[in-house]
Image (cartoon, grey):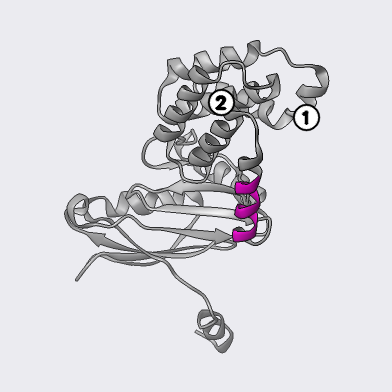
Amino acid sequence: MNKEELKERNRNRIVPLFDCDYDLFDKHLEFYTALGFEIIYYQKAPYRFASVLKDGIGEFGFYGVKNAKENGNRGGCYIYVPNVQEVYAELKANIKSYYRKIPSKGIPRMSRVNKTAEDWRFNITDPSENTITIGETFGDSTTLMEAEDERVRALESKFEKAYAAAYRLAYSKEDFLAARNTLEVAFRKFTEDFSNETLFKAKVLQAEIFASLGQKSQANEAILEANKVDLTTGEKESLSEFVDRLSEINEQIR
């Protein structure tokens, strides 16, 4: 290793270390190589440990834990990038090329890029249920979340408040069950408390939640209901992001 390589190796950086299932150690690494990571260290004895690296994202280390369900810990980290759409497109292409599909539900999985109050982000959950969030922030998270909380409190529509809560549960926390339940209650209790635009966005969100939970028939029903919402040309243009998302969900569950 020359001086420049050593300097790069010793620069100020953080390497997250995650537990992974001892018996699925190589399968675990396979998932990361499918994403486009390179294995830069590997050992099987006296204990299992490996490191993977991808330019533009960083390095992760994995320690093999026996009886992982009882003894292992699920970890997570957030990776800031300046070009989240490009990073996502590359990882998506890599994993689709390897597995012939995008694993979007269950374990492992990779989400779409989603917009939250604080960033654009997507989540990768690996075979040992560690979660890597890769995002491009809009600014200071605390300030942005305080502004979002204030915006939601100011909403007069109870349905819109429920939609905002479900959206955050789904895309910020990946708690799809809680998001599903929140929306189901909102649709039952606040039947006339929303505009067609809000109804369409809520149905798109509901379709994605069902798809993420593997509930294909319910997802199909939500897609049909979303397509029945009467939107003007102007509304469709302003909701183009959601129209495109609905099309992606429809393709995903086919």
Residue under the point 57% across and 12% down: 224
Asked whether 57 falls inside the magenta stretch, the response is: no
Task: Name the amino acid, label 2.
Answer: Ile
**Residue nearest the observer in this picture, 89 or 138:** 138
As drawn, 240 above or below 22:
above
- Residue 72 occupies which quadrant of the picture? bottom left
- Name the side, left or right, on which 125 lies relative to 164: left
Range of the magenta residues? 142-150
Q: Position of residue 173 (x, y in %)?
A: 46, 45
As drawn, 118 above or below 55:
above
Asked whether 143 falls inside the magenta stretch, the response is: yes
Residue under the point 57% across and 22% down: 203
* Residue where numbered disc 2 is placed: 249
**Residue nearest the observer in this picture, 48 or 147:** 147
Residues at circles 1 and 2 in contact by the CB criterion of under 8 Å: no
As drawn, 82 above or below 248:
below
Task: Name the amino acid, label 1.
Answer: Ser
Q: Residues within 10 Å of mark 1 (few under 14, many from 20)?
A: few
Q: Position of residue 7 (x, y in %)?
A: 56, 85
Q: Position of residue 37 (x, y in %)?
A: 48, 57
Give the farthest residue toward the right. 234
* Residue where numbered disc 1 is placed: 238
- Answer with mark 1 or mark 2, whichever residue precedes in sequence: 1
Foreground: disc 1 or disc 2: 1
Q: Secondary structure at mark 1?
A: helix
Residue under the point 60% across and 62% down: 56
As drawn, 104 above or below 65:
above
The kind of secondary structure the magenta stretch mainly shows is: helix
